[in-house]
């Protein structure tokens, strides 16, 4: 399958003016269900949308069917794949391809996961379990097919079924594209976290956004990074399940007015309104029937089509609101070097948090519990500052919609949220301009001002003569214009704050959050080391090594309990075991050498030392220092005699990672790396003594090939700036 599109990138940009509060939408007739009789006809004639009816009784056969685990034998699996191919995808043995084989097998696995997901949900509902919700703007989940087969313990059965159809499992696995739902370490840690929740039998879900084009697909043209849309949803996606019946209204712009019926609340009027629809992505637990879920939000757009404008010939105007809504979930981290980009990011984040908080509340209400029990039934973890607006959103709903007094609502909020910080750099802390916040989310700005007022009054009582402390710790930064500091909102609105590694947690307490430690005390600030899951990063991407570890441990229990791999220490002096260990490493290096040849056209020796730095391109991560060291090494080799060069350990230096689309310096670093590679790799005197490679479009699938092959993994970020150092 072609991984990268043609170098000819054509982009078409259209400018339009979406409807705002100042220019309210033309009233639109509601879309009607096409029905012809009975009460449904009455609903149609009244211009309303009818609601589907539930059955008056439960069919016992239906209940029995969905509650049973599907048979796990090879014949049943083969039959399910063939049925899907012939019925769902309308394929015959004469026109089926490896893509179709993947779709058939993947949808067959999805059916199993959905059944387990339903069983998991029913079980936790029946015991009224407290739910854990992990809110993250990124989930870098990679590919799901191989991981799901391993989690279900059915890889051999599916491999045999695929072989019966005439395909190799490796080829079928390669037909899957990475889910473009994340970019860096934050997203990968989120994916591993939700995986661990499922494997540990917790009732935990992730919440995020369904990006149509991801962040971007990185192409390297003439040494420069060029961004193209990552069209990962062009083909059917077996791993998501649309939930059109689960959708929530999300408002922007407008104005607020004191509520006539609620003495504590306000009404949000003249707002632009969109509708967020859910897509569920099942997350299978390894060695358990527990299945977690990542619920992603996307904007519904069909009801925004303006037929009156269309019929009058205003075709652009007819779809303007559809395009404006669609844009909210088109791209992860849209370029915010301009005001339009900043506004889009803010609206994107609010769409995410509003739909999520509404969904969490809807699920809580099915429990029949009182609001005083909310924090006993719901735990929400904020993965960095992107979902921090959720604090203001929950406070808004409790006061304006549920009629609570401020103190009662705030007590619930602060017992519900916890905050994970991911950065030490003060300039990387997310802030929103107060004028922009007031324009797009007028009610939330008022709530944030009130939160800040009550917080500063509390601080002033503790330290009555320290005005500088109040300025430093205020959620509202007194700059021009004023800025709302999202990290500070997250701290004030959460019961605990954690870093993602012990050193990181210590640094934030001593530096950027030291004033908050002074106010709240050290107990609020804890460490939770975020790790990566051995199920993905050993068992799946390095099955040869996994077999050796299983042999040493005695079973595969180490996959869920990685501490058991310490048994490997007993084989340190076993010469045969060490030889086989080295053979595994050599196998992975040969695989990476082939990958480099196929993706970059560069031939490298698998016998060389593989020196690898793979992560986001950023000045503080110091890829620039690394490539300067490569230049130094190259000049040293050039000054050596041919005999001396032969005595040096051959080295392949591998870079991979994306630069943010608006990050000019980072993109120049990529250009420098590729320019150095052109010189070094084409120098016949140097030969295999030194090679430089930049692998484009770094993603989880690429990492699964690169990381197992590394001899040296470079983590050389500026001291004191890296949170976890995840590749």
Image (cartoon, grey):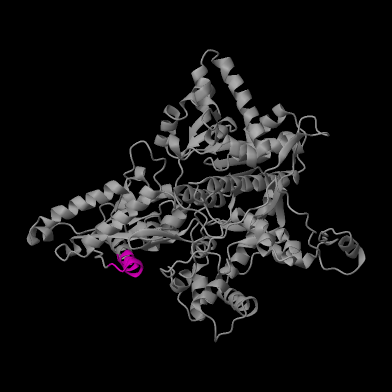
Q: Main secondary structure of the magenta part?
A: helix
So how many labels did they put on this image? 0
**Residue 165 % position (x, y):** 52, 80
The answer to whether residue 443 is above or below residue 726 is above
Q: Looking at this rendering, what residue extends furthest in the front direction? A: 313
Q: Which residues are magenta?
A: 590-602
**Residue 174 % position (x, y):** 45, 69
User: Would residue 562 appear left or right of 438 to someone viewing this image?
Assistant: left
Name the quarter where the N terminus is drawn: bottom left
Q: Residue at x 51, y 75 (%)?
A: 99
The answer to whether residue 88 is above or below residue 111 is below
368 or 465, nearer to the observer: 465
Q: Looking at this rendering, what residue extends furthest in the bottom direction? A: 94
Q: Residue at x 64, y 75 (%)?
A: 88
7 or 395, nearer to the observer: 7
Instruction: Verify whether residue 526 appears in magenta.
Output: no
277 or 537, nearer to the observer: 277
The answer to whether residue 468 is above or below residue 629 is above
**Residue 569 % position (x, y):** 32, 49
Q: Residue at x 44, y 69 (%)?
A: 5
Res 58 → quadrant: bottom right
Q: Is residue 289 visible?
A: no
Res 574 → quadrant: bottom left
Q: Is residue 585 visible?
A: yes
User: Would residue 306 appear left or right of 236 to someone viewing this image?
Assistant: right
Q: Residue at x 55, y 74 (%)?
A: 74
Instruction: Verify whether residue 599 appears in magenta.
Output: yes
């Amino acid at each position: 399958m072609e991984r990268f599109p043609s170098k000819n990138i054509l982009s078409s940009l259209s400018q339009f003016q979406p409807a705002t509060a100042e220019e309210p939408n033309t009233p639109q007739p509601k879309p009607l269900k096409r029905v012809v009789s009975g009460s449904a006809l009455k609903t149609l004639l009244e211009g309303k949308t009818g609601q589907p009816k539930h059955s008056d009784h439960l069919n016992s056969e239906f209940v029995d069917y969905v509650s049973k685990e599907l048979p796990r034998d090879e014949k049943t699996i083969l039959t399910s794949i063939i049925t899907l191919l012939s019925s769902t995808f309308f394929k015959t043995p004469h026109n089926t391809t490896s893509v179709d084989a993947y779709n058939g097998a993947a949808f067959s696995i999805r059916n199993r996961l959905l059944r387990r997901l339903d069983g998991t949900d029913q079980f936790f509902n029946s015991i009224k379990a407290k739910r854990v919700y992990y809110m993250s703007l990124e989930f870098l989940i990679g590919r799901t097919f191989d991981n799901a087969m391993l989690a279900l313990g059915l890889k051999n059965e599916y491999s045999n079924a695929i072989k019966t159809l005439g395909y190799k499992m490796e080829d079928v696995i390669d037909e899957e594209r990475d889910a473009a739902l994340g970019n860096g370490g934050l997203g990968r840690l989120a994916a591993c976290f939700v995986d661990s929740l499922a494997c540990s039998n917790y009732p935990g879900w992730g919440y995020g956004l369904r990006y149509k084009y991801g962040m971007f697909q990185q192409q390297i043209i003439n040494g420069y990074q060029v961004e193209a849309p990552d069209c990962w949803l062009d083909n059917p996606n077996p791993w998501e399940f649309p939930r059109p019946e689960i959708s929530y209204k999300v408002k922007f712009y407008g104005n607020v007015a004191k509520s006539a019926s609620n003495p504590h609340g306000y009404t949000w009027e003249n707002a632009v309104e969109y509708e967020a629809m859910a897509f569920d992505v099942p997350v299978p637990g390894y060695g358990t029937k527990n299945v977690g879920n990542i619920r992603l939000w996307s904007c519904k757009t069909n009801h925004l089509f303006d037929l009156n404008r269309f019929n009058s010939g205003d075709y652009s105007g007819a779809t303007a609101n559809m395009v404006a809504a669609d844009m909210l979930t088109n791209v992860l981290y849209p370029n915010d070097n301009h005001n339009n980009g900043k506004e889009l990011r803010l609206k994107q984040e609010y769409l995410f948090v509003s739909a999520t908080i509404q969904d969490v509340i809807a699920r809580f209400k099915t429990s029949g519990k009182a609001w005083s029990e909310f924090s006993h039934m719901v735990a929400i973890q904020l993965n960095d500052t992107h979902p921090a607006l959720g604090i203001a959103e929950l406070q808004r709903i409790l006061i304006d919609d549920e009629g609570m007094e401020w103190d009662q609502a705030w007590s619930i909020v602060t017992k519900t949220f916890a905050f994970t910080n991911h950065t030490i750099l003060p300039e990387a802390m997310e802030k929103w301009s107060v004028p922009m916040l007031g324009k797009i989310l007028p009610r939330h700005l008022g709530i944030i001002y009130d939160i800040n007022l009550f917080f500063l009054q509390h601080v002033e009582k503790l330290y009555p003569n320290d005005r500088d402390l109040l300025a430093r710790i205020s959620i509202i930064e007194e700059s021009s214009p004023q800025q709302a500091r999202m990290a500070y909102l997250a701290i004030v609105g959460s019961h605990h704050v954690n870093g993602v590694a012990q050193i990181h947690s210590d640094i934030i307490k001593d530096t950027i959050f030291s004033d908050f430690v002074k106010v709240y005390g050290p107990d609020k600030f804890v460490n939770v080391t975020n790790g990566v899951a051995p199920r993905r990063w050993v068992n799946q991407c390095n099955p040869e090594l996994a077999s050796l570890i299983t042999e040493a441990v005695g079973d595969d229990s180490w996959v869920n309990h990685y501490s058991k791999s310490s048994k490997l220490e007993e084989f340190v002096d076993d010469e045969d075991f060490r030889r086989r260990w080295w053979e595994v490493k050599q196998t992975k290096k040969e695989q990476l050498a082939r990958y480099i040849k196929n993706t970059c056209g560069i031939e490298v020796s698998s016998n060389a030392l593989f020196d690898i730095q793979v992560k986001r391109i950023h000045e503080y991560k110091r890829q620039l220092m690394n490539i300067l060291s490569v230049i130094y090494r190259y000049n040293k080799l050039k000054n050596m005699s041919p005999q001396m060069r032969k005595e040096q350990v051959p080295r392949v230096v591998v870079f991979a990672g994306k630069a943010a689309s608006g990050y000019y310096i980072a993109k120049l670093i990529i250009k420098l790396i590729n320019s150095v590679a052109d010189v070094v790799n084409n120098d016949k005197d140097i030969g295999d003594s030194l090679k430089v490679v930049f692998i484009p479009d770094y993603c989880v699938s690429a990492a699964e090939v690169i990381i197992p092959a590394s001899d040296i993994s470079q983590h050389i970020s500026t001291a004191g700036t890296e949170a976890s150092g995840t590749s």
